[in-house]
């Protein structure tokens, strides 16, 4: 594919470099229930962190991560990690309903916590985490991978911050996923444990809305969920949608689902649409359907014309280095605690407000 030259003001900046080395920032990985833990660890290690410990109650899960990080040590119990004064951070991807309590235990042990999304399955867990952060001064960080580990999404974050499309009026987030039902663990189909579709994969979309719109708070104006085609798994929600209005007047529509067909060359055609007062952006994060199997396509239209910005391999993932420095310096450059918690609250409130749609299987 040929592309016109990218205007300099729309081009990515320099890719981030490691911010630490050696033993300057030591972390551990524990409770490895979701595969996202591999990407969480990779991001931290690429930014200069050292993975010292790995723990999971299932030795096979621990061994699988250890094979990728053979210099790490296998812990016999979580306490072995929490008792190690050298460990500054615990990264985890526990069963969703266990993430909040685990984070509070980690923070009370004097360490920062980096959990896979969704960070909570109940408002009570969120309230306890807020209290624990206030009491301990530790960080409860969340791996919102669909922005933080997407070069297209991170470049869009920069473009919006530069004012490339003016003031953001609306964000539309589409988060389709492939179900892969046969390979899912039992908890995946138990609503009390996974939290519901808006709480789970919808959490990505609410975080992106807050980031790109600049809203500090938002109200859920509509939410709905359904189990359209899986009567054998009655607690599964295979479809969800929601609408928000931010405190600055920006609006948001979210659609998430488990209906990615087998013919797609990736697990999901995740897209985002950001409408501004002077232009708009479309992100084709993981694939450009029937055109390019590579992801990280940014399409931007402004008063100058139409711009296709293929940024795969050009942006990197600065969140991880910024987060390491935040942990070391007690700053909030990568993501504020208030932002992470409010994104979590929105997904919980949307889930609670959702009406059940009739099945259309």
Image (cartoon, rainbow, N blue to C red):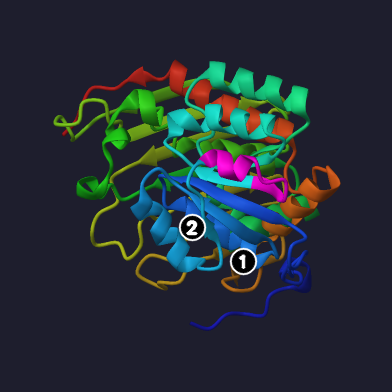
SS under mark 1: strand
SS under mark 2: helix
Left or right of 135? Residue 231 is left
Is residue 159 visible in the rendered image? The answer is no
Q: Residue at x 41, y 20 (%)?
A: 354
Q: Residue at x 77, y 51 (%)?
A: 161
Disc 1: which residue? 306
**Is 286 placed above or below 259 here?**
below
Q: Quadrant location of the C terminus?
A: top left
Q: Residue at x 56, y 38 (%)?
A: 79
Residue 26 image point, x, y percent: 69, 56
For residue 250, which quarter of the picture? top right
Disc 2 vs disc 1: which is toward the camera? Answer: 2
Front residue of this view, candidates 307 and 108: 108
Disc 2: which residue? 38
Residue lying farthest bottom? 2
Left or right of 281? Residue 232 is left
Pick whichever of labels 2 and 1 is earlier in the sequence: 2
Residue 312 image point, x, y percent: 56, 71
Left or right of 94? Residue 18 is right
Residue 291 image point, x, y percent: 39, 72
Front residue of this view, candidates 69 and 237: 69
Residue 118 image point, x, y percent: 50, 36
Q: Which mark is residue 344?
A: none
For residue 158, which quarter of the picture? bottom right
Q: Residue at x 40, y 39 (%)?
A: 256
**Is 138 part of what is drawn in magenta?**
no
Check disc 2: other Cα within 10 Å, few if <14, some if 14-19, many if 20+: some
Alpha-carbon span between mark 2 and mark 1: 37 Å
* Range of magenta residues: 78-89
């Amino acid at each position: 594919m040929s592309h016109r030259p990218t205007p300099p003001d729309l081009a990515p900046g320099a890719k981030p470099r490691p911010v630490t080395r050696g033993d300057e920032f030591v972390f551990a990985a524990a409770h490895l229930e979701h595969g996202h833990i591999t990407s969480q660890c990779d991001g931290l290690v690429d930014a200069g962190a050292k993975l010292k410990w790995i723990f999971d109650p299932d030795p096979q899960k621990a061994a699988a991560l250890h094979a990728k990080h053979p210099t790490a040590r296998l812990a016999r119990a979580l306490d072995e990690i929490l008792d190690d004064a050298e460990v500054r951070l615990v990264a985890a991807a526990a069963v969703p309903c266990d993430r909040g309590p685990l984070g509070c235990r980690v923070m009370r042990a004097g360490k920062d916590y980096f959990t896979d999304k969704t960070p909570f399955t109940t408002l009570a867990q969120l309230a306890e985490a807020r209290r624990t952060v206030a009491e301990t001064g530790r960080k409860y960080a969340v791996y919102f991978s669909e922005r933080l580990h997407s070069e297209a999404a991170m470049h869009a974050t920069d473009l919006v911050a530069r004012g490339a499309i003016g003031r953001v009026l609306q964000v539309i987030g589409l988060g389709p996923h492939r179900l892969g039902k046969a390979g899912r663990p039992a908890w995946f189909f138990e609503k009390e444990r996974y939290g519901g579709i808006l709480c789970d994969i919808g959490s990505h979309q609410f975080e992106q809305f807050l980031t790109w719109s600049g809203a500090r708070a938002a109200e859920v104006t509509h939410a709905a969920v359904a189990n359209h085609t899986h009567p054998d798994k009655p607690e599964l929600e295979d479809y969800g949608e929601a609408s928000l209005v931010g405190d600055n007047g920006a609006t948001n529509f979210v659609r998430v689902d488990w209906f990615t067909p087998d013919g797609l060359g990736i697990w999901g055609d995740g897209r985002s649409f950001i409408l501004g007062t002077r232009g708009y952006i479309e992100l084709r994060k993981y694939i450009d359907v029937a055109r390019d199997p590579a992801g990280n396509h940014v399409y931007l239209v402004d008063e100058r014309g139409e711009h296709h910005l293929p940024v795969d391999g050009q942006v990197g993932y600065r969140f991880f280095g910024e987060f390491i420095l935040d942990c070391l310096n007690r700053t909030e450059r990568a993501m504020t605690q208030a932002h992470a918690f409010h994104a979590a609250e929105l997904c919980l409130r949307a889930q609670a407000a959702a009406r059940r749609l009739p099945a259309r299987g």
